[in-house]
Image: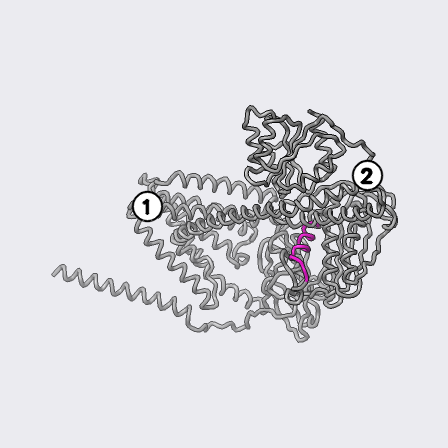
């Protein structure tokens, strides 16, 4: 009889439990899905619709979308304007400050200004908040102007602007954001009771309670939700302190959570969690110091806190898998089930935001924090594997790219070396002025071609941000002459005229990277010629002096196809060719303007473009340069003075010197032989590694020039054979690598392999003779 009573009691309790759950389910589902009945009696809050424009520095107005981004940089003021409707009535507008200083004008009246820089204890930006300002019936038809500025990633962002009665707008925000704040407050109260109860048990019963750490997790998470709520300005007297508290909570969150997980796992992985705990402490101190010292705001340093949380998630996932394999997960299977339930609740709350007009962002952190971290840990393991796979693919692609560039460098530079070398012999031995002029033009064209090849082969270096400038003094007239000669022939072939407007009073000698400036001008002139079918091209060069120094201003204007306004923003992208279908017959890789832009930026210059589609374009480059000689350069038709007067020196002559030159290309050997014909040096030549190694064992040389990319053994292998042969008479003979493999980083690699020096092809004859004399003088 007693057992039957107990069964009835249990059945009754079960039914009542189901009824209680159904009652709460009815309440929750009804409030979520049924129509809203408590409509405001005053009115409604709505999005303020208007045609907004951004006022550019030159006074022009550019239409923009609100919400959206404006064109600006960090720390620059942005102005947006619109015109209030002619039938405007008394109302209120509200805009959210995204770490921005705000000045709001109606007509000429400053209606509202917002900034917390003068009141907050530290920081470079104002706190995010909603800014309210009134609009009166008398403002109808007036201009509404909003000026804002921020030294953050939100510098040019404009949020939604709300319109309505002040009470209605606030009521809208309460309805949208209050639920998450209420839940956070509720969880905060629960966490306080959990912590208080755990501390009581610990001190009075001398027992450690694992749930203490979980209570602290909930405390930090709920506190973060409260201070990050978008209605915090209506709750906390000082929103800056509330905002800072949110970042502090994120930075501290890993500590109690790792302590809780370490506790339920009985310290099996304590070393890993200890390392994360130390990193958490260091990160917390560092970000606080950076914020207090106004070096970096929390907004700029929060990535480090996120990284630590991510590492904790991964560690939790790995240790959980290990515990599943080893069977330890049974020790905290209840906690695992609880994690799953909380995760389901969190997912439900996230999905809820897409079903009804309410926002519950962050509530999932309260209901499903643990399972969320567990799931994210497993996902992060896959992400790490994918990252590692992508890393290996990137390494393989980088190696393939380096190999391709090395081969291209070698294959292209080798024939150019022959052309330049043989042309140099013509210049040295020829006495006919006409032929001398032809050869000089060939030399200039060859140097420009070499510059273009270097431009392409070094694109990876520019792309990686490792571009290096080589600044030296140069003749401005000579540089401009080279550029004009290089481009005039191409222009004439298309029936185009290059009109020159060059200031004759410009300084004769400047200091800068002459080659890079040539590259810039050649890219601009080449583009102008390519995209101009009729008319002319105007090349203008001027200079300007101010308190900052001297700047060279160069413009290239054409009467070509022009550029559409919507294409201008993509103009300087790499591998970007505009209107490809229309211009497919025009040669080019799409790298020229991208390289030009990066070169100009590297030299602290600026590049501007003005274009009218169908009429032509004008590119203007301004580059700072140092004046070496103030003498006017004069007309380009006159023979310009060289940038540096080079005194005539005697040709090198070492009749007793013995030099071995190794190269598998016989034309390169002829170039070296011709260059050194008057030096009386005893030259020996080898066309391969084995042949040269045999020669080094039979004869002592004063210097060896060795090509790299030869049939096996290559130059590097041959060098190692010589250095490893202890009986070789050339064991310590200087070996200079003379190679067309001249991409970024090869010099260091060759020196590491054991070469004494490095010369790239095509040979720079001045450097070649200088190096030759340096080593022969030693021996």
Residue interval drawn in magenta: 586-599
Which SS class for mark 2? loop
- What residue did someone put label 1 on? 323
Q: How crowded is mark 2: few (under 14 residues within 10 Å), some or many (20 or more)?
A: few
Residue 766 in the image: x percent, y percent? Answer: 74, 37
Residue 639 in the image: x percent, y percent? Answer: 86, 46
Q: Nearer the viewer, residue 203 or 483?
A: 483
Q: How crowded is mark 1: few (under 14 residues within 10 Å), some or many (20 or more)?
A: some
Residue 691 in the image: x percent, y percent? Answer: 59, 34
From the image, which quarter does the C terminus lie in? top right
Residue with the most extreme bottom position: 87
- What residue did someone put label 2 on? 644
Quarter-wise, where is residue 733 in the image?
top right
From the image, which quarter does the N terminus lie in? bottom left
Q: Based on the picture, tell me whether residue 592 belongs to the magenta stretch.
A: yes
Q: Residue at x 54, y 52 (%)?
A: 243
């Amino acid at each position: 009889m007693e057992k039957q009573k107990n069964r009835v009691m249990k059945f009754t309790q079960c039914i009542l439990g189901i009824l209680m759950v159904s009652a709460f389910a009815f309440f929750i589902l009804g409030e979520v899905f049924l129509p809203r009945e408590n409509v405001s009696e005053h009115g409604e809050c709505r999005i303020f619709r208007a045609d907004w424009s951004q006022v550019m520095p030159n006074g022009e107005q550019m239409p923009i979308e609100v919400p959206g981004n404006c064109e600006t940089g960090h720390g620059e003021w942005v102005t947006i304007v619109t015109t209030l409707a002619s039938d405007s009535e008394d109302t209120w507008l509200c805009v959210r400050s995204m770490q921005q200083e705000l000045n709001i004008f109606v007509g000429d009246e400053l209606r509202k200004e917002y900034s917390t820089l003068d009141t907050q204890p530290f920081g470079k930006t104002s706190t995010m908040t909603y800014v309210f300002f009134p609009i009166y019936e008398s403002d109808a038809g007036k201009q509404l102007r909003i000026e804002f500025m921020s030294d953050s990633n939100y510098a040019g962002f404009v949020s939604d602007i709300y319109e309505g009665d002040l009470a209605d707008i606030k009521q809208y925000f309460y309805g949208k954001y209050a639920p998450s704040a209420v839940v956070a407050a509720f969880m905060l109260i629960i966490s306080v009771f959990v912590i208080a109860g755990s501390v009581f048990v610990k001190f009075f019963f001398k027992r450690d309670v694992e749930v203490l750490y979980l209570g602290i997790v909930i405390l930090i998470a709920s506190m973060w939700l409260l201070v990050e709520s978008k209605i915090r300005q209506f709750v906390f007297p000082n929103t800056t302190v509330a905002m800072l508290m949110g970042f502090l909570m994120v930075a501290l969150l890993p500590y109690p959570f790792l302590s809780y997980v370490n506790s339920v796992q009985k310290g099996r992985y304590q070393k890993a969690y200890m390392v994360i705990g130390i990193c958490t402490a260091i990160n917390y101190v560092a970000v606080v110091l950076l914020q207090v010292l106004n070096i970096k705001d929390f907004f700029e340093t929060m990535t480090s806190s996120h990284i630590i949380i991510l590492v904790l998630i991964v560690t939790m996932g790995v240790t959980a898998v290990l515990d599943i394999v080893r069977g330890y997960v049974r020790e905290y299977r209840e906690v695992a089930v609880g994690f799953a339930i909380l995760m389901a609740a969190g997912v439900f709350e996230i999905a809820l935001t897409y079903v009804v007009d309410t926002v519950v962002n962050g509530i999932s952190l309260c209901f499903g924090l643990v399972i969320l971290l567990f799931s994210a840990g497993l996902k992060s393991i896959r992400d790490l594997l994918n990252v590692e796979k992508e890393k290996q693919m990137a390494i393989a692609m980088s190696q393939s790219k380096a190999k391709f560039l090395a081969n291209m460098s070698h294959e292209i530079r080798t024939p150019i070396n022959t052309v330049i070398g043989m042309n140099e012999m013509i210049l040295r031995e020829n006495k006919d002025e006409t032929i001398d002029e032809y050869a000089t033009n060939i030399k200039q064209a060859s140097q420009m071609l070499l510059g273009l090849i270097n431009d392409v082969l070094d694109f990876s270096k520019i792309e990686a941000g490792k571009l290096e400038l080589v600044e030296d003094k140069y003749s401005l007239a000579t540089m401009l002459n080279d550029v004009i000669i290089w481009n005039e022939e191409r222009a004439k072939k298309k029936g185009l005229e290059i009109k020159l407007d060059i200031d004759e009073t410009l300084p004769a000698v400047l200091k800068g990277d002459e080659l890079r400036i040539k590259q810039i001008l050649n890219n601009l002139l080449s583009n102008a010629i390519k995209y101009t079918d009729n008319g002319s091209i105007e090349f203008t060069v001027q200079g300007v002096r101010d308190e900052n120094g001297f700047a060279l201003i160069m413009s290239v204007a054409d009467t070509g196809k022009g550029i559409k306004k919507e294409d201008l923003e993509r103009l300087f992208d790499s591998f970007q060719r505009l209107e490809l279908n229309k211009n497919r017959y025009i040669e080019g890789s799409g790298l020229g303007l991208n390289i030009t832009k990066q070169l100009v930026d590297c030299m602290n210059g600026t590049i501007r473009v003005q274009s009218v589609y169908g009429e032509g374009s004008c590119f203007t480059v301004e580059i700072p340069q140092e004046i070496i000689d103030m003498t006017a350069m004069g007309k380009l038709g006159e023979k310009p003075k060289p940038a540096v007067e080079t005194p005539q020196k005697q040709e090198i002559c070492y009749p007793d010197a013995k030099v071995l030159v190794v190269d598998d290309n016989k034309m390169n050997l002829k170039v070296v032989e011709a260059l050194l014909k008057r030096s009386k040096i005893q030259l020996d030549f080898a066309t391969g590694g084995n042949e040269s190694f045999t020669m080094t064992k039979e004869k002592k040389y004063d210097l060896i020039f060795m090509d790299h990319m030869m049939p096996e053994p290559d130059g590097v292998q041959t060098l190692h054979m010589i250095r490893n042969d202890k009986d070789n008479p050339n064991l310590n003979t200087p070996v200079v690598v003379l190679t067309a493999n001249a991409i970024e980083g090869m010099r260091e690699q060759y020196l590491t392999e054991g070469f004494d020096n490095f010369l790239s092809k095509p040979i720079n004859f001045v450097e070649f003779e200088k190096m030759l004399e340096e080593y022969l003088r030693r021996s």
